[in-house]
Image (spheres, rainbow, N blue to C red):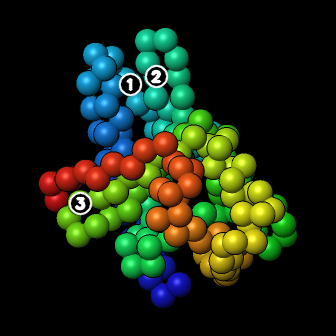
Amino acid sequence: MGHYSFLRDLEESKIAVELVKTYIIDEHKKEGVVAEIEELGRARQIEGDIEVTLPDRKYTIEIKYDIMAQKTNNLCFETNNKKGKLTGISSTQSHKVIYVVPDKKNFYLYLFETEKLQKYLLDNDNKSRFRSVWGGDRWSTEMTLVPRETIIKEKINYKVEYINAGI
């Protein structure tokens, strides 16, 4: 992964979180509902990155910024580490997962129900269909690469949004 830089990736992930927060607030506003959003601290990271509070319920969202997806046309799902421990998408307790993929000056948002995504990625028949790679810090993380067109065709996600972020 020649692109890896912790500080740059951290800044880009902050942009992705702000983008998703704005998107979620706007989507609920269209329904006439006020959404409050809290970024979750380290102690609650297993639950996701943000918690959305609505008048009648709460839910959490894991946010992933996938810069390589614009070049490879795959979404990259972290699944486990070298010790065999489930990590990333496989271990999150969030209700939803949103992948943010940059596209020139705009972004694609891939929205998933976590449980459905986990079942799909961990299904043995599906696992054998997709390429698996090692990467991350010290090449200690296994990741499953799923073509973006497969995600849409097989209806793994429940929505894809193309948004103009005005940047």
Q: Residue at x 43, y 12 (%)?
A: 55
Is residue 165 found left or right of 31 in the rendered image?
left
Query: Between disc 3 and disc 2, whose residue precedes?
Result: 2
- Asked which quadrant contains residue 135, the reply is bottom right
Query: Between disc 1 and disc 2, whose residue precedes?
Result: 1
Where is residue 115? Give x, y as percent.
67, 41
Where is residue 94? Give x, y as percent.
61, 39
Where is residue 106? Give x, y as percent.
23, 60
Pick out the residue farthest to the bottom.
2
Res. 36 mark: 1
Inspect the image, locate mark 2, and give the three-letter code of the amino acid beneath it: Thr
Residue underneath mark 2: 53
- Under circle 2, the secondary element is strand
Inspect the image, locate mark 3, and give the three-letter code of the amino acid beneath it: Asn
Mark 2 Cα shell of 10 Å, populated few (<14), some (14-19), many (≥20): some
- Judge by depth and name the residue closer to the eye, 25 or 38: 25
Q: Residue at x 46, y 22 (%)?
A: 53
Q: Is residue 89 above or below residue 126?
A: above
How far apart marks 1 and 3 lie (CA) works out to: 25 Å
How far apart marks 3 and 2 lie (CA) works out to: 27 Å
Res. 106 mark: 3
- Judge by depth and name the residue closer to the eye, 123 or 81: 123
- Under circle 1, the secondary element is strand
Q: Residue at x 50, y 57 (%)?
A: 153
Q: Are marks 3 and 2 in contact (CB under 8 Å)?
A: no
Is residue 99 visible to the viewer in this orientation of the structure? yes
Inspect the image, locate mark 1, and give the three-letter code of the amino acid beneath it: Glu
Q: Residue at x 21, y 53 (%)?
A: 165
Mark 3 Cα shell of 10 Å, populated few (<14), some (14-19), many (≥20): some
Q: Is residue 138 above or below residue 120?
A: below
Query: Between disc 1 and disc 3, whose residue precedes?
Result: 1
- Judge by depth and name the residue closer to the eye, 77 or 40: 77
